[in-house]
Amino acid sequence: MAFKLSQRSRKRLEGVHSDLVAVVELAIIMTPVDFTVIEGRRTPERQRELYRAGATKTLNSRHLTGHAVDLAPLVKGQVRWDWPLFHQLAPAVKDAAQALGVRIEWGGDWPRFPDGPHFELSRAAYPA
């Protein structure tokens, strides 16, 4: 069963680099688990808010330049934060990126502060 991005998810992709948008659009067709876009491009104010809350470890996020998105699995229309679901979602995003020739990184692969929802364009291939 192929899923579709909601209007809310599409709205949250505004300001995101077109290559990353293309990856998300292909991933929603390839994924075994439905997902939503939680956040795309962020304002500096939003980044500071998340930093103060401990939800991020940096004020220099790739979200500020539209080079990152946060995706969350949906189960019966509800956002879920279970790590096993992110491990189902991540391969679809990585496969979509590979199919499009777009280099991405998944925050779930980070050894320090793993970030399951976070996908970003490679800094080497896409400097801000």
Image (cartoon, rainbow, N blue to C red):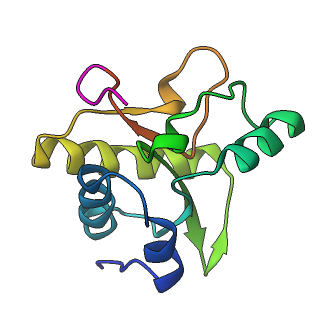
Is residue 38 on the magenta stretch? Answer: no
Report the residue at 26% width, 70% height from top: 29
Report the residue at 49% width, 75% height from top: 11
Q: Is residue 124 above or below residue 54?
A: above
> In the depicted view, which residue is nearer to us: 75 or 28?
28
Report the residue at 61% width, 80% height from top: 76
Report the residue at 23% width, 51% height from top: 19
> In the depicted view, which residue is nearer to us: 52 or 101?
52
Magenta region: 124-128
Q: Quadrant of residue 123?
A: top left
- Judged left or right of residue 47, residue 62 is left
- Judged left or right of residue 14, residue 107 is right
- Judged left or right of residue 55, residue 60 is left
> In the depicted view, which residue is nearer to us: 118 or 44?
44
- Residue sticking out furthest to the bottom: 7
Q: Is residue 79 above or below residue 63?
A: below
Q: Position of residue 127 (x, y in %)?
A: 32, 26
Q: Is residue 26 above or below residue 85?
A: below
Q: Main secondary structure of the magenta part?
A: loop
Q: Quadrant of the N terminus?
A: bottom left
Q: Position of residue 116 (x, y in %)?
A: 58, 40
Is residue 125 on the magenta stretch? Answer: yes
Q: Quadrant of the C terminus?
A: top left
Q: Position of residue 45 (x, y in %)?
A: 75, 47
Q: Quadrant of residue 57?
A: top right
Q: Position of residue 48 (x, y in %)?
A: 78, 39
